[in-house]
Amino acid sequence: MSFNRLRRNQIIRNLVSETRLVASDLIQPYFVIEGKNKKEVIKSMPGVYRLSIDNLLKDIKETKVLGIKAILLFGIPRKKDKKGTEAYAECGIIQKTVRAIRKEIKDIIIITDVCLCGYTPHGHCRILKKNAKVLDVDVDGTLDTLAKIAVSHAQAGADFVAPSAMMLHQVKAIRKALDKNDFAKTKIFAYSAKYASNFYAPFREALNSAPRFGDRKSYQLDFGDPSEALKRIGQDIDEGADIVMVKPALAYLDIIYKAKHKFNVPIAAYNVSGEYSLVEIGVRKGIVDRRQLILEILTSIKRAGADLIITYWAKEVAGRLARNK
Ligand code: PBG
């Protein structure tokens, strides 16, 4: 008979497990909207909501008690325009949110997404040349705007800014602007290896940020290509990124693994909306066991080499770890 003496029961399996999730590995993303006492359903992301600031503050407090150390914020602006002005407005949704968190909650690390896709009517992550109907990018205008957004988030009190536009040299432009404006301490959490992925679709409903024409394939990475990802991570580190990210996570475990072995900065992985929603919807159809599947997914991302995992399950899993379940 063959059995493994070290796998006989859960206690012994736990004793020898090589990969253990802890709450401080996990980062909770949030979608913030204007208004009071709002909790909007996101159809394609069951269990995730758009929250107004008051409800967000309550949720962050609960999340923090469970041992989560960091949150990632996405804002839904009052209005969109071609210059993405709401993204850097002093009273923009993210700026207000960060100030409110800073005022009410101590010791939570605030990371803010720095991008334009949610703030422009065309839904691209960059500023386009006047009247562009095709993807005609205004390179300097985009870099200036991304830097302006980052500085405005730092001003409000963000610990990390997270540029996600995949604009070449965005990290350099942001680092320079932060330093020039006396925010040398503000750190950069770079979406360095961001693939043009089909797994983002539910997020685009959450943020209403799907491109109105074209797609993001000319600026996000091709899913057949590992080398470019490593090159972009290296460039971002050279330009001043403090933490680098691979995104999505589950279909890109090889990239996480390679990045972990090649670079010596913390590696984050984004377990994105599609990875979340396909599981949640599969669960509702009764085809998988939710609790075990979530742990398996997150553990595999950590096993591949991620030091940090951004996941819509962060709060739930932190709660389960706290209760030992
Ligand atoms: C914005 C951005 C996207 C995500 C995070 N920041 C979407 C995109 O590039 O279209 C996706 C996150 C998710 O799917 O959970 N640039």
Image (cartoon, grey):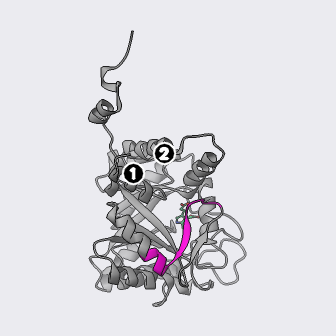
Range of magenta residues: 44-57
Residue at position x 59%, y 54% in the image: 277
Q: Which mark is residue 153?
A: none
Three-letter code, disc 1: Arg
User: Is residue 267 depicted above or below 239 in this figure?
Assistant: above
Q: State the SS at label 1.
A: helix
Residue at position x 38%, y 67% in the image: 62
For label 2, the crowd category at 10 Å Cα-Cα, with few meaning under 14, some 14 to 19 and many 20 or more, is few
Q: State the SS at label 2.
A: helix
Residue at position x 47%, y 53% in the image: 229
For label 1, the crowd category at 10 Å Cα-Cα, with few meaning under 14, some 14 to 19 and many 20 or more, is some
Three-letter code, disc 2: Arg
In the picture, the quarter occupied by the N terminus is top left
User: Mark 1 = which residue?
Assistant: 320
User: Mark 2 = which residue?
Assistant: 291
Q: CA distance from mark 2 to mark 1?
A: 9 Å
User: Is residue 85 depicted above or below 158 in this figure?
Assistant: below
Q: In this rendering, does residue 302 appear at all? A: yes
